Image (cartoon, rainbow, N blue to C red):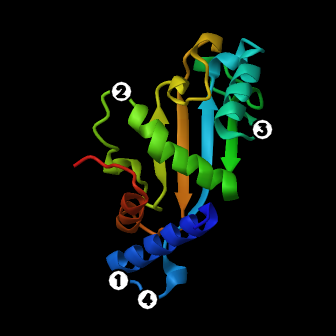
Amino acid sequence: MTKADYQNNTEQDLKKRLMEELKETNIMALPKVVKIVLNVGAGEAATKADVLEKIKEQLALISGQKAIITKARKSVSAFKIRKGIPIGAKVTLRGKKMKHFLDKLIKIIIPRIKDFRGIPEKNIDDHGNLNLGFYEQTIFPEIDFDKIDKIRGLQVTIVTTAQNRNRAKKFFELLGIPFKK
């Protein structure tokens, strides 16, 4: 059995189990992952120019794809941020890279979190998307701790076609994402 056969076999098993759990008769109505977005916000980028380049490099290592710079949508005088200045970076993963990252997230990254007790159910929004926040980028094996300038947070959003929280929770549980009991 080749790797592709094994992967297709597990996807078919997942779809069968999901159809039973959700009591769905149409396979096209099952939830699926559309995209994964990795986002790093850096308010300090307003004053330091080289910060965004380091963030882009780290995101490229983590995701295997080039990051784009995000700009402020509106001015906030308390944080000395003006509309249009660069304040973060993001990467949107789709296709094979998305599946690879999701597999890595479930099997490698989540088990590396210190004092992990499960993901709260409130991290699933009303549209069925899962939002995960990591306090430091060093839990990713691609990041060398000696080469980072500062520990930064990272947000991962898994966008699905699930219409509500219950369908999304069952889908994520079958994928192998551990939730709080």
Residue 94 appears in the figure: no
Residue type of the residue flagged with mark 3:
Lys
Pointer 1 and pointer 3: residues touching (CB < 8 Å)? no
- Left or right of 125 on screen, residue 103: right
| Residue for badge 1 | 23
According to the picture, the residue beneath numbered tag 3 turns out to be 66
Type of amino acid under label 1: Lys
Amino acid type at circle 4 is: Thr
Judging by the rendered image, the residue that carries numbered circle 2 is: 114
Please tell me which of labels 4 and 3 falls first in the chain. 4
For the residue pair 73 and 52, the one nearer the viewer reads as: 52
Would you say 60 lies left or right of 119 here?
Answer: right
Which SS class for mark 4? loop
**Which callout, 3 or 2, points at the residue further toward the start of the chain?**
3
Q: Earlier in the sequence, mark 1 or mark 2?
A: 1
Asked where in the image residue 164 lies, by quadrant, the reply is bottom left
Callout 2, which amino acid? Lys
The reply to whether the C-beta atoms of the residues labelled 4 and 2 are less than 8 Å apart is no
